[in-house]
Amino acid sequence: MRRPPCCDKANVKKGPWTPEEDAKLLAFTSTHGTGNWTTVPQRAGLKRCGKSCRLRYTNYLRPNLKHENFTQEEEELIVTLHAMLGSRWSLIANQLPGRTDNDVKNYWNTKLSKKLRQRGIDPITHRPIADLMHSIGALAIRPPQPPPNASSYLHAPNPAAPALPLVHDAAFHAAGMQPPQVAIARVDADAPSPDHGQQLRWSDFLADDAAAEAQQVLVQYHEGAAATGGGSAQAGSSSTGGGGRVCGDSVIGDDGGGDDDGAAAFIDAILDCDKETGVDQLIAELLADPAYYAGSSPSSSEMGWGC
DNA sequence: AAGGCGGTCAACCGCCGGGAT
DNA sequence: CATCCCGGCGGTTGACCGCCT
C-alpha cells in the first residue's frame, strides 16, 4: 500500500522560496527552535510542506552554513570519503563542517565525478576505468566462480569487485599510510554498538581497522585545516588556505601553485603512484587494445563478452 | 541579438528506519 | 507486536544562468 502524501498538496506552495518566506521561517525557528516540522508551516504562517521547510532550513537557512566554494582540503576529503563510504552523503557531510549533504552531493555530481572520469577513473569504484575493463575481461574468460559466502560478500568493499584493491591504495602506501579497508558495512548482529547517547559517526559503520585508518585521515585533515586555515574546521570557520593536506610524509594537493584544484592534485598523486608501480604502463596497454572498447572485435568475441 | 546547449544547484519525491503509541 | 508518524536520506528534476554558435 502506498504511503499517503505528507501534506495536502493542493494547498501547498512549491518551487523556489521567496525572501519573505525565508524571513518567516527564520524568525520562527530562531524563537521556537526546530521541533516538529509538520507543524512548523502552520505555526510560522507558511503555505509549505513541513518537509520543504525542514529542507530549506537545513540546506540554506541554518546558522554556520558555508556558502563559499569548496576548499582544496574539502575536495580531497570528499574524494577520500566517497571511496570509503560511497554515496552516503550525510555521513560525508558530517565530516565537513558547514556543508550539507545536498551541497556535497551536488558538488560530487557536477564537479568531482567529472574530474575523476576525465582522468580515467571510475567515480563509483574509484578505480581506473581500464582496470574495470580488464576485470570484466577477466571475469568473462574465468571459469564460473562459486558465489562468495555471505559474510565475505557483505564485508566486501564493492560487490562488483570484491577482491580487487582500490586504485588509490597505492597513493596511501606511497604516502606512508595504510589504505583504509573501504566501505565495510557493520551489519553483524554481534558488532559492538557505539556509545549510547552519542550520535553515530560514519566510522562506527566501518570495521575497526578501517575506522582507525579512516579516522587517521580525518585527524590529518582537521590538523591540516587548522594549520593552514587559521581556524578550527569543527567550529565551522572556513578554511580557504592554500596549503596541502599532509598525508604521511608527503603532501598531497599542494604544488605551490596555490590555485591548483585539490581533487586534481589528489588524483595526480594517485597517478604518480601508478607510474611507480608500473600500473600506468598496464593501463596504457589496455587502452591501446581496441578489444577493451569494441564489443564486436575478434578478441572480445573470443573472450566471450562481445555483442 | 537570439536560440541552443550544458552546467549548476535548489527543491522535490519517495523510501526507509526509528520512536511513540 | 502492529501501526502510525516523523525525520532523514539519496536519487532525481527543473529552473536558472552563462557560454557558444
Image (cartoon, coloured by chain):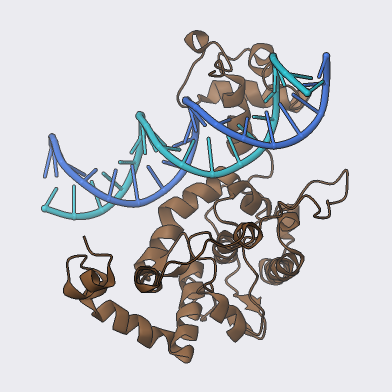
Chain colours: A brown, B blue, C cyan
Q: Report the residue at 73% width, 58% height from top.
A: A203
Relative horizontal placement of residue C12, taking residue A31 as reference (left or right):
left
Q: Report the residue at 45% width, 80% height from top.
A: A271
Q: Quadrant where the C terminus of chain A lies?
A: bottom left
Q: Report the residue at 48% width, 70% height from top.
A: A259
Relative horizontal placement of residue A10, taking residue A224 as reference (left or right):
left
- Could you tell me residue A287's position as x and y percent? 28, 77
Q: Report the residue at 43% width, 56% height from top.
A: A111
Q: Determine whether A255 is above or below A197 in the image.
A: below
Residue A262 seen from this side: yes
Q: Determine whether C4 is above or below B19 in the image.
A: above
Q: Determine whether A40 is above or below A128 in the image.
A: above
Number of on-image labels: 0
Viewer-side residue, A186 vs C2: C2
- Could you tell me residue A71's position as x and y percent? 56, 62
Viewer-side residue, A118 vs A190: A190
Residue A252 seen from this side: no
Q: Quadrant where the N terminus of chain A lies?
A: top right
- Could you tell me residue A236's position as x and y percent? 71, 52
- Could you tell me residue B19's position as x and y percent? 81, 29
Quarter assignment of residue A134: bottom left
